[in-house]
Each structure stands twice: as C-alpha cells, then as structure tokens.
Amino acid sequence: MTEDEARNWLRERFDVSRETQLSRFADILTRGASEQNLIAASTLAELWARHLVDSAQLISLAGDGEGTWLDIGSGAGLPGLVVAVLTDRPVILVEPRGKRVEFLRSAADELGIADRVEVIGSKVESYKPERPAAVVSARAVAELGKLFAGAQHCTDSSTVWVLPKGRNVQSEVEAARRAWQGAFHVEPSITSPDSGIVVAKRVRPR
C-alpha cells in the first residue's frame, strides 16, 4: 500500500474532520520521533500506510460497540491514539515507559481528546481496571499466550481482542491454543501481505 492509497483508504471510511485530526497526529508523531525512538526512522516515509492505516484497520474488526478500548504497550500511540482520533470510544493506553507516557498524554492533549483518553503509566499486569474492556489491542508487544495471561484480568467473556501479528501469526495461534480457549481467527492485514490480525473472543484458560 502506497502513501496515497493509505490516505484514500482512510478518506473513504472516515469523515474529513477525522482525517484532518489524523494528519495532526502524524505531525505530532513525526516531531516526537525526532526526540525519542517512537518509531523506526526508516518507516517515517511510509507513516500513513505502515502505522496509521495499519492501526485504523483494527477498528472495523472490533465491532460496533461503544465500550472502552484498552491498548497495551501503546508506545507511540499505535493503535490507541489512532483509535481515539477515528472513533468516539473512551480509550485507555497502558504504557510502562516514562517518556512514552509523557508523549501520549501530551499528544492526547494537543489533539483535544484528553477527556476520553486515559494514559496509565504501568505494565498491564499491574493495572486494575474499574470495569472490563470492550476491546483489547496490542501491537508488537508479546506473543499471544503472554498477552492473554497478562491482560485477562482486564477482560470478560464479551471482550474482543484485536492483535496485529507478523508472518508467524498462525504458529502463535496454535501455541496459544494449548493453554487458552475461545473463538480465534486470523484476518489478513491490508498493509502487509505477510502479516495477520488475530481476532479473539471468549478467551479463557483451558
């Protein structure tokens, strides 16, 4: 997917004000990347396809609910801040690294969405949510079994997990099935033919 194709994909699915807001986030992300290693410098030329659309494609996979979206290891705000920009959902970003926490809070404030974006400065294992998340995402954080184990206390039987994975996605699913049960399927990524997105529901230990 080229940068033009990425922008067109977003334009077809979201209104102009959302796209404008996402452009602001792209500027914030580019600026922040020069100050700390938010994303690999080699991917800046492909920011819209490699990071923004790669994050935005998770939204339709999560369903139409209005509950809280929990993003684990948010880092640069991918996908958490993209979700917050493109939807009206409350979003919780869980990130243990101090500088990333500062970046996320500053970015949410600059984007005018701090009223529904909460940044938690800890590992997800230590986070105590008030209520189960409707959706859980995690981009390049850990293998499936570890994600389920670390965040299960933040979910219930209705939670939808949307987890982007690389070329080993099928083997990760098979490994996770040894200790976890539920409804699992893999959606192809529109931004990378070698990648897939695990969509899991009713996740529980065996």
Image (cartoon, grey):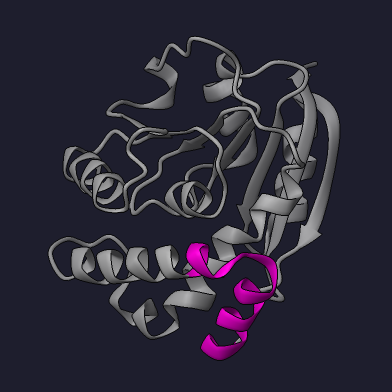
Q: Is residue 56 left or right of residue 118?
A: right
Q: Quadrant of the N terminus?
A: bottom right
Q: Where 127 falls versus 73 (above or below)?
A: above
Q: Is residue 134 left or right of residue 72?
A: right
Q: Where 113 falls versus 79 (above or below)?
A: above
Instruction: Tell whether position 31 is magenta.
Output: no
Question: How far across and how far down the image is residue 85, in percent?
Answer: 47, 53
Q: Where 177 falls versus 170 (above or below)?
A: above
Residue plotted at (77% across, 17% down): 157
Quadrant in the rendering for residue 64:
top right
User: What residue range appears in magenta?
Assistant: 2-19
- The residue lying toward the viewer, choosing from 58 and 165, is 58
- The residue lying toward the viewer, choosing from 97 and 7, is 7
The dominant secondary structure in magenta is helix
Q: Is residue 9 left or right of residue 127?
A: right
Instruction: Tell whether position 15 is magenta.
Output: yes
Residue plotted at (41% across, 40% down): 73
Q: Is residue 37 left or right of residue 11?
A: left
Question: How far across and how far down the image is residue 155, in percent?
Answer: 63, 19
Q: Quadrant of the C terminus?
A: top right
Question: How far across and how far down the image is residue 118, in percent?
Answer: 36, 30
Residue plotted at (55% across, 59% down): 55
Name the residue furthest left: 35
Question: How far across and how far down the image is residue 30, in percent?
Answer: 26, 72
Count every numbered label the image shows and give the total: 0
Residue plotted at (57% across, 48% down): 87
